[in-house]
Image (cartoon, grey):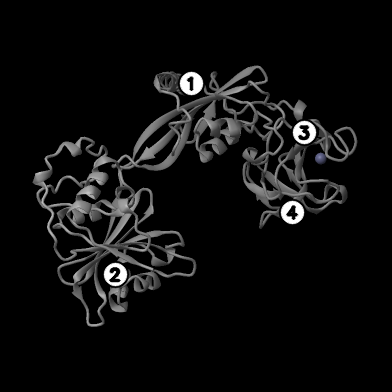
């Protein structure tokens, strides 16, 4: 059901003040252009929305046209403005804003028609849109803003659309607007994003994932952090209570200061096994970024120590025994307890040698990395589509999913490393480190390392209270 709200003088003032006092959800949701249109309009504005909230409403008077212009820092002292300067008069509604969301099974056409557009107008707007954006790419959950001019109704009593706008990605905004000739014109506006670095640190009481989450590190950043360290650290066995971490990561904000997306981790440090493991992001001469330790050695190794999504490991400090047989008997492997369906990654580049049923191992995958090394993965729920014998896979690629097939009591990944076809204890495996920076590149790395350390030291740490992005 739709609700139409009309506002009298006091309501309008109250909402104007509420809007100016803090960034409202409307300022956050609505494209700049719409706010600009709203701010240029006279007085009473009727807002029609499927789910109206008081803060979604914006009104303004012609005397104060700049007040609603979105700014990175909304004026916080606006309550001090002399109230008499704002005159709000009763007038017919000038514009109708509808914020709608694409539902499952919707097309752009069906959504527009359901929300008041007539078919020819919707068709004309979509045709204009298709010059800059494929309308079929619109997905359920996508928010759209429709602006109507209630002064102009067509013969069926339908409202006249003046703009369709949406934000297909954090970097872009698309506006399809009515032009003077009665046609529609589509425009893509690139949004300017500013990067900020955030610092977080904490003590690990249970898992790195939970410890980082507690101090406000967002989940996608934690997953990246774990991935960067999964060459070196067995996240189910190496971490002990009291270990700690540091991280410096990028976040991008739009011109209004609203969060847009996360960027790269620039620096991290894990203190595990009584050792500090600092890592710095550095872009090499060939343009490839990688993570290097203090000495300029890449941590990327031929094989990963944790070839499973480390953020989803279940046991706190690791099960030390095989669920059924313990380590001694069936295999010299290593078990990672994780929920069914957790992605399993190829530990290194290679070729699939076996992907099928293998008695006690259940669903079993083996990858040949080179003449010397192979890795094997047991008790899988299923293989990733396309993963079969002879298939080339690359390090970190999702090849299968954790399960409990074969001789197993619960979902876990059984992981083996084979050297010359003999199973070895993965915990004992010492792989040579990857690339070592030299000469000019090493000198450049040291500069980057120094600068990153300075930024880290100068940044305030996130606290639980600061967490909201
Ligand atoms: Zn096992």
- Is residue 284 at all visible to an observer of this figure? no
Label 1 residue SS: helix
Decide which of tag 3 and tag 2 comes sooner along the chain: 2
Q: Picture coordinates of residue 48 (x, y %)?
A: 30, 64
Q: Which residue is mark 1?
A: 442
Q: Picture coordinates of residue 418 (x, y %)?
A: 79, 36
Ligand 1 neighbours mark 3 (CB distance < 8 Å):
no
Decide which of tag 3 and tag 1 comes sooner along the chain: 3
CA–CA distance between discs 3 and 2? Answer: 59 Å
Q: Which residue is mark 3?
A: 319
Query: CB of mark 3 within 8 Å of CB of mark 2?
Result: no
Q: Which mark is residue 125?
A: 2
Q: How many numbered marks appear? A: 4
Q: Which mark is residue 389?
A: 4
113 or 356, nearer to the observer: 113
Decide which of tag 2 and tag 1 comes sooner along the chain: 2
For label 3, count other residues whose C-alpha is less than 10 Å away and answer few (under 14), some (14-19) or many (20+): some
CA–CA distance between discs 4 and 1? Answer: 41 Å
Q: Residue at x 46, y 65 (%)?
A: 103
Q: Left or right? Give the position of 379 relative to 251.
A: right
332 or 282, nearer to the observer: 332
Label 4 residue SS: loop
CA–CA distance between discs 2 and 1? Answer: 55 Å
CA–CA distance between discs 3 and 1? Answer: 40 Å
């Amino acid at each position: 059901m739709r609700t139409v709200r009309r506002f009298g003088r006091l309501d309008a003032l109250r909402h104007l003040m509420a809007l100016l006092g803090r960034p409202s959800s409307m300022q956050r949701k609505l494209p700049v252009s719409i706010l600009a249109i709203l701010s240029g309009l006279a007085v009473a504005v009727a807002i029609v929305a499927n789910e109206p909230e008081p803060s979604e409403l914006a009104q303004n008077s012609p005397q104060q046209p700049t007040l609603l212009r979105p700014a990175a820092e909304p004026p916080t002292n606006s309550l001090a403005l002399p109230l008499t300067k704002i005159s709000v008069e009763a007038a017919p509604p000038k514009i109708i804003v509808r914020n709608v969301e694409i539902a499952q099974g919707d097309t752009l056409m069906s959504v527009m028609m359901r929300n008041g557009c007539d078919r020819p107008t919707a068709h004309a707007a979509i045709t204009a849109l298709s010059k800059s954006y494929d309308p079929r790419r619109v997905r359920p959950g996508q928010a759209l803003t429709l602006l109507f001019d209630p002064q102009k109704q067509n013969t069926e009593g339908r409202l006249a659309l003046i703009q369709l706008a949406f934000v297909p990605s954090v970097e872009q905004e698309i506006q399809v607007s009515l032009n003077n000739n009665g046609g529609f014109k589509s425009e893509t506006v690139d949004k300017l994003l500013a990067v900020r670095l955030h610092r977080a640190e904490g003590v690990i009481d249970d898992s790195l994932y939970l410890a980082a989450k507690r101090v406000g590190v967002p989940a996608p950043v934690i997953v990246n952090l774990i991935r960067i360290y999964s060459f070196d650290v067995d996240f189910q066995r190496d971490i002990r209570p009291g270990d700690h971490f540091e991280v410096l990561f990028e976040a991008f904000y739009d011109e209004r200061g609203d969060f847009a997306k996360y960027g790269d981790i620039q620096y991290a440090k894990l203190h595990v096994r009584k050792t500090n493991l600092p890592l710095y992001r550095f872009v090499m001469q060939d343009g490839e970024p990688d993570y290097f330790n203090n000495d300029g050695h890449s941590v990327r190794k031929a094989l990963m120590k944790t070839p499973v999504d480390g953020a989803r490991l279940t046991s706190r400090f690791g099960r030390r025994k095989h669920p059924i047989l313990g380590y001694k008997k069936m295999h010299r492997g290593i078990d990672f307890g994780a929920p069914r369906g957790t992605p399993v990654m190829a530990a290194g580049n290679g070729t699939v040698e076996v992907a099928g049923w293998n008695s006690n191992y259940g669903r079993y995958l083996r990858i040949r990395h080179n003449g010397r090394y192979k890795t094997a993965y047991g008790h899988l729920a299923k293989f990733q589509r396309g993963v079969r014998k002879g298939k080339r896979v690359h390090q970190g690629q999702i090849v299968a999913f954790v399960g409990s097939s074969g001789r197993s009591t619960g979902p876990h990944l059984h992981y083996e490393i084979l050297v010359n076809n003999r199973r070895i204890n993965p915990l004992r495996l010492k792989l040579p480190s990857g690339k070592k920076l030299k000469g000019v590149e090493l000198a450049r790395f040291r500069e980057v390392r120094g600068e990153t350390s300075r930024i880290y030291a100068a940044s305030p740490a996130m606290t639980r209270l600061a967490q909201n992005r």
